[in-house]
């Protein structure tokens, strides 16, 4: 366990140094898309790499918003290149958060819930993949929180990356294309989030009552 903590501390230290480097290079403190885009364009060929690094840090740290960074990508580099750059950085950050949680919390979760069809060592891969995909589609869910939560489940790393990448691409593309002129409707995002949460709560309850249903078998949740 001590070695795992050491690895995590090294990773967090690297992230802190990366943030310091961005500030030394003149990154705007307000992180507005217009200011960030102008700064990135002034960095020449290093601009895309700096944007990837900023997105990675934003995902791992959590409170740093990721959607303005996606908008910045479109403003600075164009829709398609900007989407690819932002998505690559976000996927990298999600993977770092995923593995931090896996290193620190996975064994404890397995010991606490040995028979849970989702959290156990042989938990349902299909159910977890769909859950990650759905939560990535709704921007109101914390990108960092979902990544950390996924790390303590049984979800395979490759499934996590695939679900994360596919799920985040639509909104990343929208923000990269429309830049800082796009605003999410709070009502629509909250309604969508509540709908996803309602489904996630209802499914386990339904499966507990009908463990041999066709959907439970398809999701590999039957015991």
Image: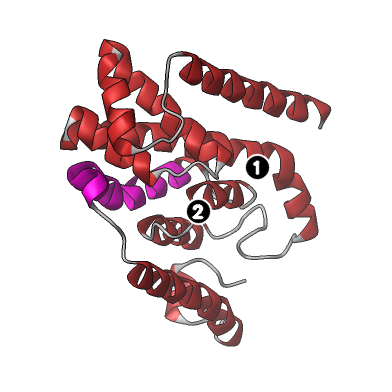
Q: Earlier in the sequence, mark 1 or mark 2?
A: 1
Q: Is residue 187 visible?
A: yes
Q: Is residue 3 above or below residue 221?
A: above
Q: Is mark 1 in CB contact (under 8 Å) with mark 2?
A: no
The residue at which mark 2 appears reads as: 142
The C terminus, quarter of image: bottom right
Q: Which mark is residue 101?
A: 1
Q: Position of residue 28 (x, y in %)?
A: 41, 27
Q: Position of residue 169 (x, y in %)?
A: 29, 47
Q: Secondary structure at mark 1?
A: helix
Q: Is residue 216 visible?
A: no
Q: Mark 2 Cα within 10 Å, few/some/many (few <14, many 20+)?
A: some
- Magenta span main SS: helix
The boundaries of the magenta stretch are 159-181
Q: Mark 1 Cα within 10 Å, few/some/many (few <14, many 20+)?
A: some
Q: Is residue 160 above or below residue 136?
A: above
> How many marks do you count on the picture?
2
How far apart are the two marked residues, 1 and 2, measured between alpha carbons?
Answer: 15 Å
Q: Is residue 171 above or below residue 60?
A: below
Between 42 and 161, the one lying in front of the other is 42
Q: Nearer the viewer, mark 1 or mark 2?
A: 2
Rendered residue at 28%/41% (across/down): 71
| The magenta stretch spans residue 179 | yes
Rendered residue at 16%/32% (across/down): 78
Between 96 and 58, the one lying in front of the other is 58
Q: Position of residue 38 (x, y in %)?
A: 27, 25
Q: Position of residue 50 (x, y in %)?
A: 38, 21
Rendered residue at 32%/22% (across/down): 39
The N terminus, quarter of image: top right
| Horizontal arrangement in the rendering, residue 194 relative to residue 39 (left or right) | right
Asked which colour scheme the image uses, the reply is secondary structure
């Amino acid at each position: 366990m001590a070695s795992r903590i050491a690895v995590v501390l090294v990773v967090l230290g690297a992230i802190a140094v990366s943030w310091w480097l961005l500030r030394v290079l003149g990154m705007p403190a307000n992180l507005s898309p217009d200011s960030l885009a102008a700064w990135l364009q002034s960095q020449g060929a290093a601009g895309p790499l700096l944007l990837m690094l900023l997105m990675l840090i934003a995902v791992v740290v959590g409170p740093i918003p990721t959607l303005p960074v996606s908008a910045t990508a479109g403003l600075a580099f164009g829709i398609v290149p900007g989407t690819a750059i932002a998505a690559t950085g976000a996927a990298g950050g999600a993977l770092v958060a995923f593995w931090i949680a896996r290193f620190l919390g996975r064994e404890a979760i397995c010991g606490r819930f040995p028979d849970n069809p989702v959290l156990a060592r042989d938990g349902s891969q299909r159910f977890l993949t769909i859950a990650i995909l759905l939560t990535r589609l709704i921007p109101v869910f914390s990108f960092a929180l979902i990544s950390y939560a996924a790390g303590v489940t049984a979800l395979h790393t490759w499934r996590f990356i695939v679900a994360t990448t596919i799920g985040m691409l639509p909104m990343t593309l929208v923000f990269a294309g429309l830049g800082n002129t796009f605003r999410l409707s709070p009502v629509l995002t909250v309604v969508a989030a509540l709908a996803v949460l309602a489904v996630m709560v209802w499914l386990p309850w339904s499966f507990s009552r009908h463990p041999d249903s066709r959907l439970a078998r398809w999701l590999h949740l039957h015991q």
